[in-house]
Amino acid sequence: MVGIEVLNEPNGYVIPLYMDNNTVADVSSTISGYYDTAVGLVQNANNQMLFIIHDAFESLYYWTSFANPNAVLDTHHYEGGSLADMY
C-alpha cells in the first residue's frame, strides 16, 4: 500500500454544517481542517505513506493552500448531465 484516503467524496459545498452554538460553518473549511489533522496522524504512523485527499468537488485553486509534500489530490470526474441525473 502506498497511500491512504481517509474520506471519500466529501461534499464540500452543499450541506451546511451547524456547530454547537447553532452557527453555520463553512463545510469546505471543516473538511480541510479534518485533512490537516488526519495528515498528522498518518504521517506519525508512517512518514513514507502518501495521503490522498478527495477534492470535495472544489476547484484545484481551492487546494493550493493545502501544501503537503505527501498529499495527492484525488478527483472523480463524472459526466451525464445534471446532478439530478446522477441520483
Image: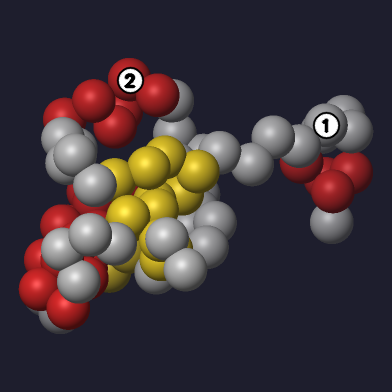
User: Which residue sits at x=84%, y=48%?
Assistant: 86
Q: Which mark is residue 61?
A: 2
Q: Residues within 10 Å of mark 2 (few under 14, many from 20)?
A: few
Q: Quadrant of residue 18?
A: bottom left
Type of amino acid under label 1: Glu
Which quadrant is home to the C terminus?
Answer: bottom right
Q: Give the Cα distance between marks 2 and 1.
A: 21 Å
For residue 9, side relative to residue 24 (left or right) = right
Q: Residue at x 54, y 56 (%)?
A: 9
Can residue 56 be seen at all in this image of the molecule?
no
Residue with the mark numbered 1: 79
Residue positioned 37% across, 42% down in the render: 72
The picture places residue 20, in percent across and down from the top left corner, at 15, 79
- The answer to whether residue 80 is above or below residue 20 is above
Secondary element at image label 2 = helix
Q: Nearer the viewer, residue 5 or 32?
A: 5
Q: Secondary structure at mark 1?
A: loop
Res. 47 image quadrant: bottom left
Does residue 81 show up? yes
Residue 79 at x, y percent in the picture: 83, 31
Amino acid on which the number 2 mark rests in the picture: Tyr
Q: Is residue 32 left or right of residue 51?
A: left
Relative to 40, residue 53 above or below: above
User: Nearer the N terminus, badge 2 or badge 1?
Assistant: 2
Tag on residue 37? none
